[in-house]
Image (cartoon, helix red, strand yellow):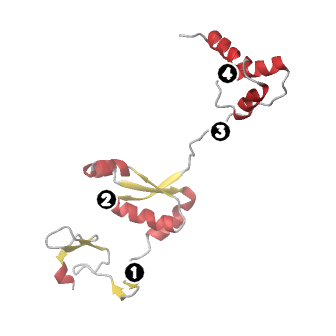
Amino acid sequence: MTTPEQERARLVGIYSAKSDGELEELAAARFDLSEGALQALEAEMARRGLKITVAPAEGFDVPELNETVTVRQFRDLPEALLAKGSLESAGIQTYLVDDNMIRMDWFISNLLGGVKLKVRTQDAEAAMEILNQPIPETVEVEGVGEYAQPRCPVCNSLDVGFQQFHEPPRWACQSCHNEWNVEAQE
């Protein structure tokens, strides 16, 4: 193992063999020189009487610490991704917390408190306003016309989803948890 003095002597030998132009290039690019290498380079330039300025060290990434607040928690990842997309389309920067853990093992969602949707503190009010918008009763579909959002036959809620992977396919209400067959809705 080499000592710092041996390493410095090795670097002095390398730099003394370089031309003035090579030293200037090395100083301009800096090449992430260690403290010892930088000292050896500066010593060689001083010995030769070169007036070369060594470039400052390149910057490095600093983690940005944003103050965030949780605006919603979701048991399922797809719902969280839809809400995240709604906020981002409105220009609000969002973060999902615990989404990767739940992707790996959805069973631990309740243990972790679900997927948390976070926004910057200054965006919380606008985010809540967007997330609390009511579900529209009808949607204009290009080329088809007006589409009426299905309603739950029990509680009349518009907060329903299509469960296509069930046999037979059916609708499910997010409000009262009622489920009914597709034919019953039509």
Q: Position of residue 63 (x, y in %)?
A: 56, 43
Which amino acid, mark 1? Answer: Pro
Residue 178 against residue 145 in the figure, above or below: above
Report whether 99 appears left or right of 70.
Answer: left
In the rendered image, the residue lying farthest to the left is: 167
Q: Secondary structure at mark 1?
A: loop
Judged by depth in the image, the label closer to the viewer, 3 or 4, is 4
Between disc 2 and disc 4, whose residue precedes? 4
Q: Can you tell which mark lies on residue 16?
A: none
Between disc 1 and disc 2, whose residue precedes? 2
> Alpha-carbon distance for marks 3 and 4?
18 Å
* Callout 2 crowding tier (Cα within 10 Å): few <14, some 14–19, many ≥20: some
> Alpha-carbon distance for marks 3 and 2?
40 Å
Cβ atoms at labels 3 and 2 below 8 Å apart: no
Q: Can you tell which mark lies on residue 76?
A: 2
On the image, which quarter does residue 144 sit in? bottom left
